[in-house]
Image (spheres, rainbow, N blue to C red):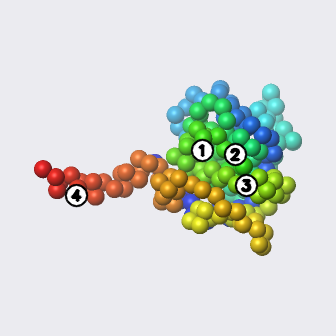
């Protein structure tokens, strides 16, 4: 599966200060009836964005957001906790996010995000506090240098597992990476008795 490659992402942020945002809040269980990634963006944070009648809630940070200019979600600590739900990064990606920044991102969510074109960025507490206090700020996430830049002289470093980083830079999931190597695999196999 191919994705939009991520090298340098410059975007405004959407801030959700809540801690312990779990995968059921990101994509409620009733929307897990599909195996397609397309269209799940409308269900992202559904219960936070809409009331019981389906009317938009004015209090939601996501309602009225221009996804084209707000591709970075800054969230409270322990983002993506809860059940393993690949639909969660699918929904965020389909909504328009390309990166999620927090001080702590749940391991299973992080793994699912990396395999689905969404960059999870963990930053130190000080950086996290500064980003949480600046909704709508223009931020640069540079996957090549593994840095987050904000303002004129503010920068933080983050880590990404090397294979996942390569896949994101190339815009492919792990299977896509393997398929891109098919000629080299065939050449290796044909050289073996």
What residue lies at 80% left-to-right and 28% top-to-bottom? 53
User: Between residues 120 and 2, which one lies in front from this camera angle?
Assistant: 120
Q: Nearer the viewer, residue 36 or 113?
A: 113
Is the residue under label 3 in contact with that under label 2 (CB below 8 Å)? no
Do callouts 1 and 4 mark residues in contact (Cβ within 8 Å)?
no
Whether residue 123 appears in this view of the structure is yes
Quadrant of the rendered structure where residue 160 is?
A: bottom right
Residue 167 placed where, x, y %? 48, 55
The answer to which of marks 1 and 2 sits earlier in the sequence is 2
- Residue shown at the point (60%, 41%) measured from the top left: 107
| Image quadrant where residue 144 sits | bottom right
The residue labelled by disc 1 is: 110
According to the picture, the residue beneath numbered tag 4 turns out to be 187
Q: Earlier in the sequence, mark 2 or mark 4?
A: 2
Locate residue 108, reporting x and y percent.
58, 38
Within 10 Å of the Cα at label 4, are there few (<14), some (14-19), or many (20+) other Cα atoms? few
* Above or below 92: residue 34: above
Residue on which the image places disc 3: 124
């Amino acid at each position: 599966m191919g994705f939009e490659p991520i090298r340098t992402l410059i975007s405004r942020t959407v801030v959700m200060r809540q801690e312990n945002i779990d995968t059921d809040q990101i994509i409620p269980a009733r929307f897990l009836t599909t195996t397609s990634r397309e269209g799940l963006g409308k269900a992202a944070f559904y219960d936070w964005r809409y009331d019981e009648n389906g009317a938009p809630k004015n209090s939601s940070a996501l309602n009225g957001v221009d996804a084209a200019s707000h591709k970075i979600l800054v969230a409270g600590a322990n983002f993506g906790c809860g059940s393993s739900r690949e639909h969660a990064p699918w929904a965020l990606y389909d909504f328009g996010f390309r990166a999620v920044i927090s001080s702590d991102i749940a391991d299973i969510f992080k793994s699912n995000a990396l395999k689905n074109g969404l960059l999870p960025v963990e930053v130190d507490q000080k950086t996290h506090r500064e980003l949480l206090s600046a909704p709508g700020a223009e931020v640069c996430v540079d996957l090549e240098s593994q840095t987050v830049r904000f303002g004129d002289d503010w920068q933080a470093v983050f880590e990404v597992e090397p294979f996942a980083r390569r896949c994101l830079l190339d815009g492919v999931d792990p299977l896509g990476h393997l398929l891109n190597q098919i000629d080299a695999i065939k050449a290796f196999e044909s050289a073996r008795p």
